[in-house]
Image (tube, rainbow, N blue to C red):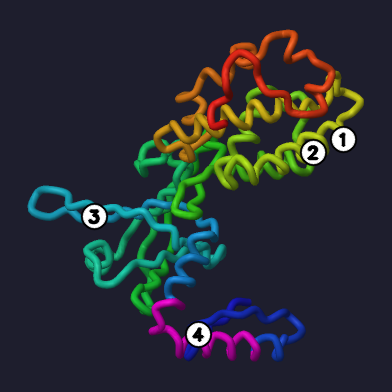
Amino acid sequence: MLLFHRSYKACYCIGSNRLFSSKVEEILTQTDRLHHDADDCDTRKVYKSIMQKVPQPVVVVTSGYHEGGQWHKKGMTCTSFTSVSFTPPIVSICLKIPSKFHDLIVKTRHFAVHTLARHQGIPVILGCSGVMECEADSAHQIGDHNVWYGNVYEAHIDDNVAHPMLYQCRTFRSVGDEIFIQSFEDATLPFEDWTHEAHLRMAWNYIRDYGRDQALPLIRDGIKHFNEVHKDRIKTGYHETITMFYCFVIADAINNTSNPIETFEYFLKQNGHLLDRSLMYKYYSNERFNQPEAKQMFVLPDKQVLPGM
């Protein structure tokens, strides 16, 4: 059960049979220290930096009313969205005060929550993965925000939308990429899905998050691990020069693409040349590429210099 400590604005969990009192006391002591230091600028900056790294669901909250023969509508992107109760269905959203949207909900006492699909880099209402229509129940002020609780009286879901969106580090991300990378690292990705495009997607994810040089060992070790798990189906095995080549060209494509971290689909649409399996031969001659040492170590191209070298 989740409880809120009024003085410290902290929450902790109580199990059905025992209370972890010592741990709770430690948490409250730490929270009290943070509370007293709340006016410290450095603390606020660190707090914001930490919260930017926490993946959040992305929803659009809308509300409106009809007056004077016309509709007055507003909407806002909200990442502070939580399921509070299943029976009855209740959700919560956090709204900054003062704000025009907060005032609108005070007036209407109704709002709708739209969960976004991964292709919606710019939030829109059409094509959402789900919508919940809510009646405002109550609101509690916490710091500079009000936490609104809404009773869900109607809900709709689009089964054709497979991947909802996350917000992390000031960017929108698809849950599909998180699942894809996890299945790659666990080597649970079906072998038939380990295509050339899947290789590109894996490298794009790592290079986007870590940069080319830090991503390289993750890419190299990940491919070797995946190959080892599926060794009965691997025909050619790991190739260092191929891996290095694609790290260079994908990193270059990221650097030269507007909004390169929006979605992989968007990135690939802007860089369709990466799908060309003969791309390497614009940089390597057959003789150079087929040198025995090219598989074990990185061999420089002999036709043209790799981008970023």
Identify the amino acid type marked 2. Ala
Quarter of the picture containing the C terminus is top right
In the picture, residue 136 is in which quadrant? bottom left
Q: Nearer the viewer, residue 9 or 65?
A: 9
- The residue at which mark 3 appears reads as 64
Q: In front of the other: label 3 or label 2? A: 2
Give above or below for 242 relative to 201.
above
The local secondary structure at tag 4 comes to helix
Identify the amino acid type marked 1. Val
Q: In front of the other: label 1 or label 3? A: 1
Q: Are marks 4 and 2 in contact (CB under 8 Å)?
A: no
- Few, some or many C-alpha atoms within 10 Å of disc 4 (few <14, some 14-19, many ≥20)? some
Residue in view at x 44 percent, y 53 percent: 170
Q: Residue furthest right?
A: 232
Q: Which of the two labelled residues, at mark 4 and mark 3, occupies the earlier sequence position? A: 4
Q: Which of the two labelled residues, at mark 1 and mark 4, occupies the earlier sequence position? A: 4
- The residue at which mark 2 appears reads as 187
The local secondary structure at tag 1 comes to helix
- Few, some or many C-alpha atoms within 10 Å of disc 1 (few <14, some 14-19, many ≥20)? some
Q: Are marks 3 and 2 in contact (CB under 8 Å)?
A: no
- Few, some or many C-alpha atoms within 10 Å of disc 2 (few <14, some 14-19, many ≥20)? some
Q: Are marks 1 and 2 in contact (CB under 8 Å)?
A: yes
Gap in angstroms between the C-alphas marked 1 and 3: 55 Å
Quarter of the picture containing the N terminus is bottom right
Q: Which region shows up in magenta?
A: 25-43
Q: In front of the other: label 4 or label 3? A: 4
Q: Nearer the viewer, residue 229 or 67?
A: 229
Residue in view at x 49 percent, y 43 percent: 157
- The residue at which mark 1 appears reads as 229
Residue 93 lies in the magenta-colored region: no
Residue 41 lies in the magenta-colored region: yes
